[in-house]
Image: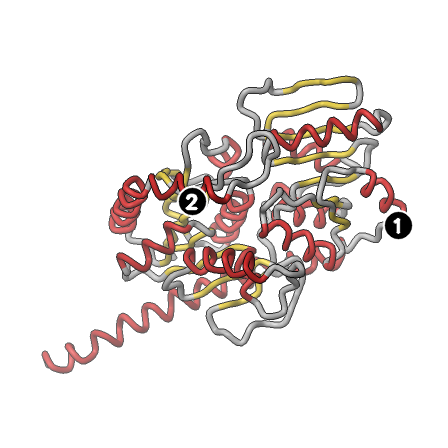
Amino acid sequence: MKVLFIVQGEGRGHLTQAISLRQLLSKAGHEVAAVLVGTSPGRSIPSFFSEQIQTEVRSFRSPNLLYDAKKGGICVGKTVRTHLLRTPAYVASLRWIHEQVQEIEADILVNFYEVLGGLYNLMYRPATPMVCVAHQYLLLHPEFPFPKNSWLDRQLVNFNTQLTALGAKKKLALSFRKIPQHSSESLTVVPPLLRQAIKDLQPVAEDFVLVYMTHPGLSSQVRAWHEKNPDVPLHCFWDNPGAPDEWQVDETLTFHRIHGPKYLRMMETCRALVTTAGFESVCEAMYLGKPVLMVPVPNHFEQACNAIDGVLSGAGASSSTFDLSILTDFLPYYQSPQAEFQAWAQESERVFIKQLEEVMETAQQEAYASLEPRMVLHA
């Protein structure tokens, strides 16, 4: 089976999921021919992805969320206005994606929540079937727990989610835990995708807390808490291009530029994790048995949903701000779901290979069936 990935390049979650699925496919004897990654101005493809994906990476211009530089929250209006002005660039990206699909001639397309991937599938209707993979598809499940009074946010997020999966044969919804399958044949609940690098770690608990934030504007909250609690050692990873690789504020507070190997080493040895409620980061912590404080990015509805779901799955606690006192208060009572989560995660290889192979075989059967009338007529 020859596979082509289309990946949303914002954040690290979809990128690490692509790495994991590439590893599973390679182990099963299948080939990922290339990876198409959506990027935006000011953001480059992280070095860890280029190093670990082990196949050709090609990039294209794609929409991304825009943040408030001071508060770190999402600016919805600015995001919409900016991307409307960039429409010609995205039309060009759709043409470029089509050229790549025609050149590579894959048996199946796997889209990791890239909206241009869904729009491409609708507009160009390639013969190659598309399967979509993301945690966000779980929000389409009728049993998913949403925040209260969130009807409008739910509709907006699910509208975007449906855009990423236009014409898809299957939507594979990554989940922290097993939940009943949806009645829709196209929506399947599946285990998380974890990189082999995470599974190879030997976790221990040293006396420091690891903090991961997607936007440097959130660092002010961490520093404010640290000033009142200087006895708790903190190592913080942030996406701040203007900062040095390592900035030691004082003896117990250090900021690090995002660096894959260093982050994994500290994930392996930290006492607990504080993160901006990204699905992948929480999964990695659960696999390693690390308690998590989930802090959704302001105005980021998907992360607010992740935090609720993560708490229900036993990952830890949630907070609207980086108030690490919530973490230190619940640590003595934390009961890790590590064993159950690892058992669920171990099913990923069997489940994903089965789902993708079924889609490819169905597509081949349909293509063969469409030729049969012509063959009979010719005979």
Label 2 Cα neighbours within 10 Å, binned few <14 / some 14-19 / many ≥20: some
- Asked which quadrant contains residue 246, the reply is top right
Above or below, comparing residue 124 to residue 17 in the picture: below
In the rendered image, the quadrant that contains the C terminus is bottom left
Q: Earlier in the sequence, mark 1 or mark 2?
A: 2
In the rendered image, the quadrant that contains the N terminus is bottom left
Instruction: Between residue 35 and residue 25, name the one nearer to us.
Output: 35
Q: What type is the residue that disc 1 sits on?
A: Tyr
What residue do we see at 82% from left, 33% from top? 206
Residue 163: x and y, percent?
A: 41, 57
Q: What type is the residue that disc 2 sits on?
A: Val
Task: From the image, tell me which residue sits under label 2.
Answer: 80
What residue do we see at 35% from left, 62% from top? 129
Secondary structure of residue under mark 1: helix
Task: From the image, tell me which residue sits under label 1.
Answer: 333
Q: Given contact means CB atoms under 8 Å apart, are the residues at marks 1 and 2 in contact?
A: no
Above or below, comparing residue 141 to residue 37 in the picture: below
**Left or right relative to 290: residue 189:** left
Instruction: Between residue 53 and residue 247, name the one nearer to us.
Output: 247
Residue 122: x and y, percent?
A: 32, 60
Colour mapping: secondary structure
Instruction: Between residue 157 and residue 278, name the one nearer to us.
Output: 157
Secondary structure of residue under mark 2: helix
